Image (cartoon, helix red, strand yellow):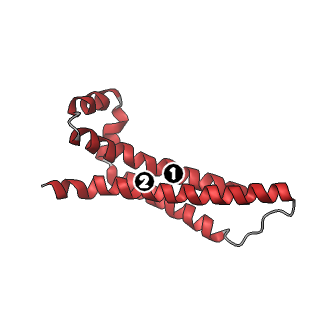
Amino acid sequence: MRLAVRETAAPALALFASASTLICCALPALLVTIGAGAVMAGLASNVPGLVFLSQHKAWVFAISALLLSAAWYARWATRNAPCPADPAKAKACSRMRAFGGVTLWIATLLLAVGAFFAFLAADLLL
């Protein structure tokens, strides 16, 4: 049971945290870049948490990176853990391991995209 929680909860939590970096930093940059500044202003006034996340983006990225690192460590720690002997459970175990791996790679990509827009994109445009 503990192995299943590690293989599903940790990647899902890391994906959620990485997606928050896109919401705080990449979405506003994208909207302003495509000329939708009014949409961004409306979004910022209707979603007050967005402004808070943008103001504290260093903390958002630090927490996301910490959760992502913990998920990668959990995956590494269980890399040699056996799957159950029952064929149906073994197949489910293999699927969950594959799904967890894909989820972690997607979360890592989302964190990298968010970090680019939060910390590098503005410097490249100037």
- Residue at image location 33% in from the left, 50% down from the top: 57
Mark number, residue 95: none
User: Is 118 in front, or is 94?
Assistant: 94
Label 2 neighbour load within 10 Å: few <14, some 14-19, many 20+:
many
- Left or right: 86 in relation to 112: right
Q: Is residue 63 visible?
A: no
Q: Secondary structure at mark 2?
A: helix
User: Is 86 in front, or is 53?
Assistant: 86
Mark number, residue 15: 1
Q: Are the residues at dot 2 and dot 1 in contact (C-beta closer than 8 Å)?
A: yes
Q: Is residue 121 visible?
A: yes
Q: Amino acid at mark 1?
A: Leu
Percent position (x, y) of residue 50? 34, 38
Q: Is residue 43 above or below residue 16?
A: above
Q: Amino acid at mark 2?
A: Leu
Quarter of the figure with the C terminus: bottom left
Q: Earlier in the sequence, mark 2 or mark 1?
A: 1
Q: Which residue is mark 2?
A: 110
- Residue at image location 85% in from the left, 59% down from the top: 87
